[in-house]
Image (tube, rainbow, N blue to C red):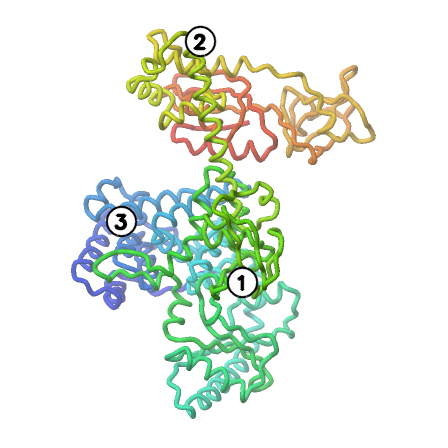
Amino acid sequence: MKAEEDSITFESVYEQIKENIQDTDELLKIKEAYQFALEKHRGMKRLTGEDFITHPLHVADIVNGLNVDAITIEGALLHEVLNNGETVLSEIEEKFGSTVATIVDSITKINKLELVDDSESSAIYLRKVLVGLATDVRVLFIKLADRLHNMRTNYAINPKKQKDKAYETMAVLIPIAHRLGINSIKSELEDLCLYYTKPDVYKDILDKLSETKKELNDSLEEMQESITEILTEQGLKFKIKGRVKSVHSIYNKLAKGKKWNEIYDILALRVILDTVSDCYLAVGLVHAKYRPIPNRFKDYIAMPKANMYQSLHTTVFGVDGHLFEVQFRTYEMDEFAEKGMASHWSYKEHGTKKVQNIMEQKLEMFRNLIETHEEVDDLAFARDVTSDMLAEMIYVFTPKGDVMELPRGATPVDFAYRIHSDVGDKTTGAIVNDVIVPLNHELDNNDIVKIKTNPNATPNKDWLNFVKTSQAKNKIKSYFSKQERTFMTNKGKDILEKELRKRKLAFAEVMNEENIKKILKDLKLKDLDDIYLSIGTLRYTAGFIISLTMDNKANVEDALLEKVNNRSLDKENYKNDIIVAGSGDILVNIAKCCKPVKGDEIIGFITKGQGITVHKKDCSNIINRKERMIEVNWNYEKDTSYLTDLIIETDNAKNYLTDIIATFTKRNIHIDSFKTKEYQTSYVYEITIRVKSKEDIAKIMVDLEMLSFVLKVSR
């Protein structure tokens, strides 16, 4: 889809900006940001053939349409300079301040990450986007505008990348635009993504709309005139707009199984009025003349959507037998419906830059997802984001009448944690609609929920079996993780004290301030508790910690190597993990040459006297063999770990063994052995690890590839 856009200039964009921003100093900074970007991008071209500066200009124009502040516009104009110009972050900070620099830096980092086919990378991408959101929501405004303009000019890249970019937009950015309530960007992105992912479907819908365009427009105009007459007679002041529904909206109906001739409500009207009471009066007047469709009236004014969208929706039998969806809202609601939370950005109040309370309420959902991200693996994180963003929602009430939005299937425990973490932690019971219910009771629309608490109560691990929201899951896991951490920290301290007593050494002398600083630096730990924790979790021995304080201290890498290579593993029979065609109790071994893990495509090789040896199907040792091969499959009900090899190539600035070991430790992946080879231009680490599945390998490979010194990771 080649977007036919008018040529854009800074002067034309600046005229629009001045309608939203009047402060002279702020306008001067915006001009400076443009001049800076113009100079940095001078001579550069986009794939469309346009000067590169047109892209940041379009992005600035789009975010300005959301009524954002001057800092957001500066960030939009500068968002590519770290990528395309010879610019360093300190230069931006010096010229435009730390806030703009942080926004530009966040956008630059986000733009370096791309969604790929596997869900692990998708999850990491989602995490980075949401972390950017949590620090400053303006990063998201710019990112959405950046993607919208890129999708408008998506025709300039090759067909595969067009589809990849569209799928990435659907998976990551459209749900975020929806949650932020920025409908003007969301709806256009939906249409553009449909065009690039299903061009035939898009064209078919467009052709069908074109065939009936005159008839539809005539009906729309007649219905608009009729409603105008009805409301004018009652002295109401209003503005009315009509439209044919978007291609993507119609596609959604077709995708749900409807046929073209069964889609009646293609026509939509929007009535914008001065007050809320006028909205209710107007919908009553329209219903008095045009019969409404049962169960199609939605009151989003009394009960706003999750993204704070408010409006009255009804569908009526209108002129010419057509069904019309009619929306009634105030001017403020209409602005919010199109611009979402950006319209509540209060950049003029007392000269401060802050997010209004309404935005803070909605961003809390994102913060809850990321605040315990270190304790949640990427796949779980991606699943939580998807379920929290896209699940079917129910609306329940507190005894005081406050509305809480929860995914269908949520329980009183989810409700308690949505109110506050302390309420969730201290929950002991629940009353729903004046009836005592168990804590795993599934709530329904319009339930009134009262939570019983006890100041001495604590979370129950069994709650994890039934809670629905990621917020509740993460809070419960976090509580028990902290309990476990405290236990292991105390255990580590006891082990260290016993070892010191055994060696007849004084604790105060060995663990003095100087030695503690040295240990923290050598092992890259945060504080004394971290040292205790590393001993309690057996990451390091007490003897090794003590040796770091002595003159004859052990080398960190030698200690790690000794620790890893001293691990003794029993010979294992994998007969319960592999399903062998036509056989029951038979000896099964994992091939040492290719070391398959659960999730790999596998084949069995019958070895005389040794049962079945399982290889990866593409293993070079069996790829040309036809005899003595047997079909085998993984038993996914078993939860066993397997050995496999990774080869990590790094630059030769230094030996990065401790950094690599730390990366595996964060994932709780055990290392069985490793070898280090030093070459003229690089280090190569051959590491044998123990994992449960191919997904574990994919996740740790992504972690390793994101380390700045890693050149290549292969299996």
Q: As rendered, which of 453 and 112 lies closer to the eye?
A: 453
The amino acid beneath tag 1 is Val
Q: In the picture, residue 309 is in which quadrant? A: bottom left
The amino acid beneath tag 3 is Val
Horizontal side, residue 98 vs residue 181: left or right: left
| Residue depicted at x 46% and y 23% | 661
Determine whether label 1 and label 3 are within 8 Å by CB: no
| Residue depicted at x 39% and y 13% | 546
Q: CA distance from mark 3 to mark 2?
A: 57 Å
Q: In the picture, residue 342 is in which quadrant? A: bottom left
Determine whether label 1 and label 2 are within 8 Å by CB: no
The amino acid beneath tag 2 is Lys
Secondary structure at badge 2 equals: helix
In x, y percent, where is residue 69?
28, 59
Horizontal side, residue 416 vs residue 259: left or right: left
Q: CA distance from mark 1 to mark 2?
A: 61 Å
Residue at the spot of label 3: 100
In x, y percent, where is residue 128?
42, 44
Q: Which numbered circle lies on residue 502?
A: 2
Image position of 98 with respect to 675: above or below: below
Q: Which numbered circle lies on residue 271?
A: none
| Residue depicted at x 58% and y 85% | 291
Secondary structure at badge 3 equals: helix
Q: Residue furthest bottom?
A: 233
Which of pointers 1 and 3 lies earlier in the amino acid sequence?
3
Secondary structure at badge 1 equals: strand
Categorize mark 2 by other alpha carbons within 10 Å: few (<14), some (14-19), many (20+).
Answer: few
> Closer to the observer: label 1 or label 2?
2
Which of pointers 1 and 2 lies earlier in the amino acid sequence?
1
In x, y percent, where is residue 428?
55, 49
Residue at the spot of label 1: 396
Q: CA distance from mark 1 to mark 3?
A: 40 Å
